[in-house]
Amino acid sequence: MTTPVPGTVRPRTVADRPGARRRRRVEAAWAYGLLGPSLIGISLFLVLPILVVLWLSLNHWDLLSPMRFIGLANWIDILTDPTFGNSLAVTVVFVLMVIPVQTVLGLVIALLLSRGLRGSWFFRIVYVVPWVCAPLALGVVWKWIYAPFGGALNALLGTSTEWLTTPALALPAVAAVSIWSQVGYVALFFLAGLAAIPSQVLEAAAIDGASPWQIFWSIKLPLLLPTTFFVLVTGVISSFQAFDHIWALTPGGGPDHATDVIASRIYLEAFGGAFHLGRASAMAVVLFVLLVVVTVIQQRWFAKRVTYDLS
Amino acid sequence: MTSRRAGRRRAPDFLAYGILLVGAVLTLAPFVLSVMTALKTPLQLASEPVLAPPDPVTLSNMQRLFTEYGFVSPVVVTAEVVVVVLVGQLAFSVMAAFAFAKLHFPGREALFWLYLATLMVPQVVTVIPLYTMFSAVGLRNTFWSLVLPFVLGSPYAIFLLREYFRGIPDDIIAAARIDGAGTWRILVQIVVPLSRPILATLTIITVVSHWNSFLWPLIITTGRDWQVVTVATAALQTQYNANWTLVMAATTLAIAPLLVIFALFSRRIVGSIALTGFK
């Protein structure tokens, strides 16, 4: 009854006194009072929506006629729908275009910045600028840059390529904007990871005659594994949900659905005119499950690799 | 031998600067180009090369944005949303984080686990159920629909604050209790003042993410009454597709406030990104 909780505020002697139980009750009341607003917020706006979206996925509803329970019909529908299949494929290709490039580029930039060159702080700040800006606004800016007539890119190249309306070019063009806006952010994480490597380890390797290349492959890269894990997981999760800049660049799913990523498909099903809320909900659940699976797989893969304790 | 090694070291430095400089130009060019375009007349954009500096420099695009295209209201609405969400989210997140970090109560671990689990929930998944919920209670297209889902606290902020509060020694709090301070006074007069750095970081994160927010406002508002800056910019672009000087004025307006904040607090922002994940 009076087992002291580790890290408790009260000394044990006080907790053993008769008034302790009342005091504990007062403390619990305070705790729940302080938690009240966030508990309401999280229950109503994060937990309840998960239950609602599951329920909606089992119903036919277009906001106008009454909701109708149809069991798994939406599910069978979307899983055999080539448009949704296309969206899944487009999303996976988009993620495969963005993640490797931004991770490698971010690592290269971090390695260059970690050399202690004068003025490194300036580059560090410059590279993160796109990250703080609204993805929607950046998407609109790039839409102009890509414009076939009067656009900056074609003006510089002296061409009039239809970057965003040619099916084969649209997705790479959209992915390039993603990479452009996130590379500096990724670099910052690698920079923090590099800074955490004890300099003695690197010095010892250099004294033993290791080349910079060997030091990178045998010391830095293995020690950066936890950082890489974090960068990959957060990158994959956010790329799977990417919407704002894709929507700005290619609204409505792009030419021939070439940039119709899952998020844009969900939006179009639900609010693109027909209000297929049930179908869109089923797609949202698929996206959620996919993200959980991807996270677990990445976790497994990295857990198998060695982690080093430098403390 | 030594001279060769020194020479070898200098060459990569040179190369490093070159690569970093190219990267910086590529990063900043879209911003410079879009602001330049916003300051040009439509005639100049059509007749002269894209890289030509604005001549004459004109603010007429920006002016028309406010007078003809009604961009005053979106700026005001967005600013109001940001302020209300910021105040509510910080206050309620501080309260929750303090309870998790420093108070003992039954169900603490289970509840904290629940809060952490909600970090995994993507926004794309919740917008449809939230839309139906807000429609059901008649709050669609209102100011409340823009702020309510966020104003009561964020699991992410609570998580970061709890980590920080746990670093505050229990002795300080115990001493305050012995001096007769109640839980509320301890929170407001001791814990909050000790947590200025993390509160500053969270302030920037919240302002940035809600000024930039697009998907939820796009879905839950219709018409001009509660249109935010991002939604107004997207609508303008769709409607006046070829009028790039005007559209670039809108994107400049959507981006500029954050660039100012970034310029003022760049060191703190850059420093806190790796620390917090900044989302």
Image (cartoon, rainbow, N blue to C red):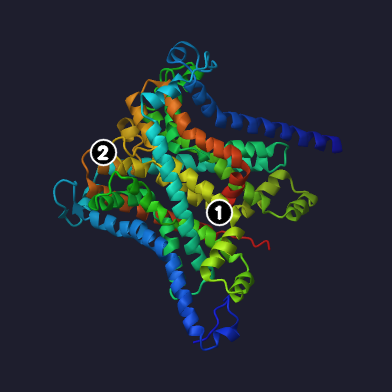
Residue that label 1 marks: B199
* Quarter of the figure with residue A53: bottom left
- The 10 Å Cα crowd at callout 2, few under 14, some 14 to 19, many 20 or more, is few
> Total marks drawn?
2
Distance, label 1 to label 2, CA atoms, is: 39 Å
Question: Looking at the image, which residue is at 81% across and 36% down?
Answer: B6
Relative to A14, say whether B109 is above or below: above
Chain name for mark 2: A
Name the disc covering residue A272, or none: 2
Percent across and percent down for residue A11 are: 60, 81
Question: Looking at the image, which residue is at 44% across and 21% down?
Answer: B61
Question: Looking at the image, which residue is at 77% across and 51% down?
Answer: A203
Percent across and percent down for residue A258 are: 34, 34
Extreme-front residue of the structure: B180
Relative to A15, say whether A213 is above or below: above
Amino acid found under the numbered disc labelled 1: Leu
Front residue of this view, candidates B196 and A221: B196
